[in-house]
């Protein structure tokens, strides 16, 4: 959200929530990570309640709904499923904006407004009216810091190999990139390359660990872009970002 960064993130122990990329992104945002206790759904009751609401108020009304029991599904739910992942994401996002944020909370209304009808939107507006908010516009460089990191060696005249694809930029032919980086620890001597898996045409990197550390502190690092190798000489370029 543009209003604030989460102070604490409570997660269960599933792989999607505890993988290195998610943990690194949370630390980049300055979040405290609080793992829930095993088999204790009450530690993250708000999330469980939201999932139950999405299930009962939206998903069970869509074609292809399988439900928790065979009695809840149709004769052939696989044949009824016609939405792609992108379409499903759009349906859920539209439902959140149009339905969930405007539905009356009923018994979950605030104690300071007995008998009043309140929705998530009205409660958010009341909180903002009471305490206000400081709009935080993230720096453009935050985009790079949240991308997935790959620790690799830079090959002369070839560049780096990420996810089965080779990426190259003219700056990578500099002799300093053919030597081990100043990075230590687990990824000693390797260069960090960041990629957006939604766009495999380019990857991003900084010249050394010092520059990346400088960027993390004061957004002073220079991020460079390397493009996928192909037969076109124009792709052998690098531009500052």
Image (cartoon, grey):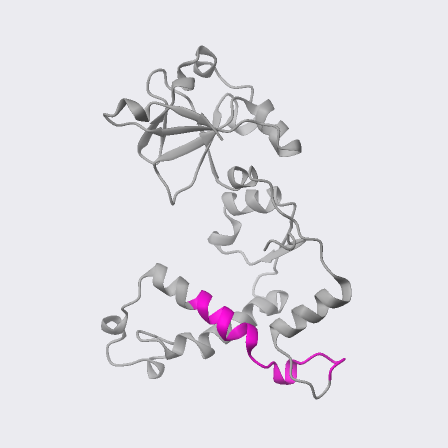
Query: Would residue 94 be counted in the magenta stretch?
Result: yes
Q: Position of residue 132 (x, y in %)?
A: 74, 61
Q: Position of residue 58 (x, y in %)?
A: 43, 76
Residue 157 appears in the rendering = yes
Hey, which quadrant is residue 217 in on the image? Answer: top right
What span is in magenta?
Answer: 92-113
Residue 140 versus residue 202: which sits nearer the camera?
140
Q: Position of residue 35 (x, y in %)?
A: 61, 55
Name of the residue lying farthest toward the bottom: 115
Residue 68 appears in the rendering = no
Quadrant in which the N terminus is drawn: bottom right
Hey, which quadrant is residue 174 in on the image? Answer: top left
Residue 235 versus residue 211: which sits nearer the camera?
235
**158 left or right of 101 in image:** left
Query: Would residue 157 be counted in the magenta stretch?
Result: no
- Depicted 145 relative to depicted 73: above or below: above
Q: Position of residue 107 (x, y in %)?
A: 64, 85
Name of the residue lying farthest toward the top: 175
Residue 85 versus residue 34: which sits nearer the camera?
85
Residue 191 versus residue 198: which sits nearer the camera?
198
Residue at image coords 41%, 21%: 154
**60 left or right of 76 in image:** right
Residue at image coords 71%, 71%: 126
Q: How many marks?
A: 0
**28 left or right of 232 in image:** right
**187 left or right of 202 in image:** right
- Depicted 208 relative to depicted 57: above or below: above
């Amino acid at each position: 959200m543009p209003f604030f960064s989460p102070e604490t993130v409570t997660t269960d122990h599933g792989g999607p929530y505890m993988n290195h990329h998610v943990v690194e992104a949370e630390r980049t945002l300055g979040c405290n990570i609080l793992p829930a206790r095993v088999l204790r759904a009450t530690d993250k009751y708000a999330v469980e309640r939201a999932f139950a609401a999405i299930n009962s108020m939206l998903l069970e009304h869509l074609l292809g709904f399988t439900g928790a029991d065979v009695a809840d599904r149709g004769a052939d739910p696989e044949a009824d499923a016609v939405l792609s992942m992108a379409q499903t994401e759009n349906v859920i996002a539209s439902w959140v904006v149009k339905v969930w944020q405007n539905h009356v909370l009923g018994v979950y209304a605030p104690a300071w407004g007995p008998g009043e009808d309140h929705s998530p939107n009205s409660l958010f507006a009341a909180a903002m009216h009471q305490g206000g908010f400081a709009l935080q516009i993230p720096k453009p460089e935050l985009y790079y810091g949240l991308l997935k990191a790959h620790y690799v060696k830079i090959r002369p005249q070839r560049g780096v190999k990420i996810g089965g694809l080779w990426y190259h930029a003219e700056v990578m032919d500099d002799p300093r990139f053919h030597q081990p980086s100043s990075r230590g620890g687990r990824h000693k001597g390797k260069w960090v390359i960041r990629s957006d898996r939604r766009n495999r045409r380019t990857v991003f990197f900084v010249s050394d660990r010092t520059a990346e550390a400088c960027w993390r502190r004061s957004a002073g690092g220079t991020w460079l872009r390397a493009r996928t190798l192909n037969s076109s000489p124009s792709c052998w370029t690098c531009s500052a970002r």
